[in-house]
Amino acid sequence: MNTLTSLSLAGARDALRSRKVSAAELARAHIAAMEKARGLNAFVTETPDLALDQARESDARLAKGEGGAMEGIPIAIKDLFCTKGVRTTASSRILESFVPPYESTVGANLRRAGAVTLGKTAMDEFAMGSSTTTSAFGPVESPWKRRAGANDRLVPGGSSGGSAAAVAARLAIGATGTDTGGSIRQPASFCGIVGMKPTYGRCSRWGIVAFASSLDQAGPMTRSVRDAAIMLGAMAGYDPKDSTSAPLPVPDFEAALTGDVRGLKIGVPKEYRPDGLAAEIGALWDKGIDLLKRAGAEPVEISLPHTKYALPTYYIVAPAEASSNLARYDGVRFGLRVPGQNLEEMYANTRAAGFGAEVRRRILIGTYVLSAGYYDAYYAKAQRVRALIARDFTEAFRKVDAILTPTAPSAAFAIGANQEDPVTMWLNDVFTVPTNLAGLPAISLPAGLSSEGLPLGLHIIGRPFDEETVLRTAEVLERALDFRAAPPGVEA
Ligand code: GLN
C-alpha cells in the first residue's frame, strides 16, 4: 500500500504504462490513505466510487496501449473548481449544496488526459486566506509536526491548504490549486511540496469560482518539479470560453527539464531582504543562490523598487474584484437561500448567513474602495501602482532570465495563531503577491527545514509564458537541494 502512495507522478505514469500497477490498485491505495487521514480534514467531499469507475476506464485504455499524459493518476481537486455532478462549495456555507451542471475547463482537460479524481479539497472560504482556517467546514491540519515534541496542530497554509495537505500526506499524487496572491505557493512551502502558479492566461479560469478575476490562476501541486511539469501540461491551454485565456500552444514542459542552467542569469531582488527577515530564511535563500551558481548560473543583484507597495495594492484590487464577483450569491441563482419579508431582506439574510467573517471583510473593503467618493483615491490609484510593480519586473527581465526569492516569510504556524489581526495574516503573501499583480509564472519548491523541523520553500519567478525556464531552473535547484523530508509517519 505504502509504496503505491509514495510514487511520484512520473513514476506512477511509467508503472501504469508498463502495467506494473493498475489504475484501480493505485486508486484503491489512495482511497485507503484518505480514509486513514480523515483527521486532517483535507477533503470537503470524497468521491471514491467515481475514482474507481474512472480508474477502471483508465485500465481499459492502458490495456489497449492508449491513454493520456495523466492516465490513471489519482489526483485531488480544490473545491473551487466546478465539477459536473459533484458538490462544489468553495468551502463556503453559501455554496454548501451547490452541484454544478458543468466541469471547469482545467478539470475537463485533466480528465481528458486520464486523471482519476479522488475528491474535492478544503480551502479558505472563496480562496481568501493563507491558513485554510476560514473554511466553513473547519480548519485543515498539516501532516507536519514541529520537531521539539510540541504537538501543536499546524496550518497547511492557504488558501489551497487541503490540496497541499493531501499531496504532502500522500493521499493524492497531485492536486489542483488556485493562486490569487500566493495560494498555491505558500501552502506548498508550508507542506514541503512543489506548487506552481503559471502565467496569467495559461490555464483557463472557466468554471473556477471567481475570487479576483485579474489575479486568479490555476496550477499544479505535486511532490516534484517534474510532476508539476507533467500536470501543468495537462491543465493548460487556450480556451475560447475564457476571454483572458492566452491563444498560445502548450509547450512540452517536461522536455524543458534539461538539467542545464549554465549561463542563465538569476536575479536576486534586494527589496526581498527586509530588515526583519528571519535569519534561517535568509540563509536558505543564500544557499539556493550558491547552488545555482555552482550549477553554472550567474546570480545578479536586481531592484524591484515598488515591492513595498505590493501588499497594499493587492488588498485594494483583490477585495474590489471579489466584492463584484461575489455579488452573484444573492439567494436567487446558487446555493443557500434564507427567506425574508421581501426580496431585499432575503438577499441580506442569505448573505449574512452564507458568508464567513473574512469574506464579509473583503466585500466591505472592496465595496468601499469602489464607491463613488473613494474610487479614484483607492482603486484607480492601486491600478496605477500595479502597473509600476509590473514594470519593475519588465525592467528586471531585461537583465535576468529568472528571479530567486524565498516563498514565504515563515514556516507553518499553529492553527489559531495570527488570527487576532487580519493584517498579520496578510503578511504571509509578501513575496508571492507581486507576481500575481504582474501576471508572471512562479514556482515554490521545498528547500530545507526550519529550526523546528518544518519545511521552507524557495520561489522562482519567470518571464510571461516562460514556464519552461522556471521549471528548468527549479529542477536543477531541486536536485542540488536534495530535500527528502516527509511528514512524520509518511513514507517519503
Ligand atoms: N492569502 C491571499 C488572500 O487571502 C491570497 C489568496 C489566494 O491566493 N487565493 O487574498
Image (spheres, rainbow, N blue to C red):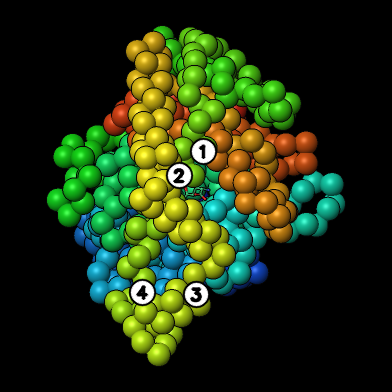
Visible residue check, residue 278: yes
Left or right side of 18 for 276: right
Amino acid type for the residue under numbered disc 1: Pro
Rendered residue at 78%/57% (across/down): 152
What is the distance, in whole Å, between disc 4 and disc 2 at their CAs?
A: 23 Å
Q: Quadrant of residue 442?
A: top left
Residue 330, disc: 4
| Dot 1 and dot 2 residues touching (CB under 8 Å) | yes
| Dot 4 and dot 2 residues touching (CB under 8 Å) | no
Q: Nearer the viewer, residue 381 or 51?
A: 381
What is the distance, in whole Å, between disc 1 and disc 2 at their CAs?
A: 6 Å
| Mark 2 lies on residue | 316
| Mark 3 lies on residue | 352
Q: Secondary structure under badge 4? A: loop
Q: Where residue 224 sits in the image (x, y, percent)?
A: 49, 40
Q: Where residue 466 sits in the image (x, y, percent)?
A: 31, 28
Total label count? 4
What is the distance, in whole Å, between disc 4 and disc 3 at their CAs?
A: 10 Å
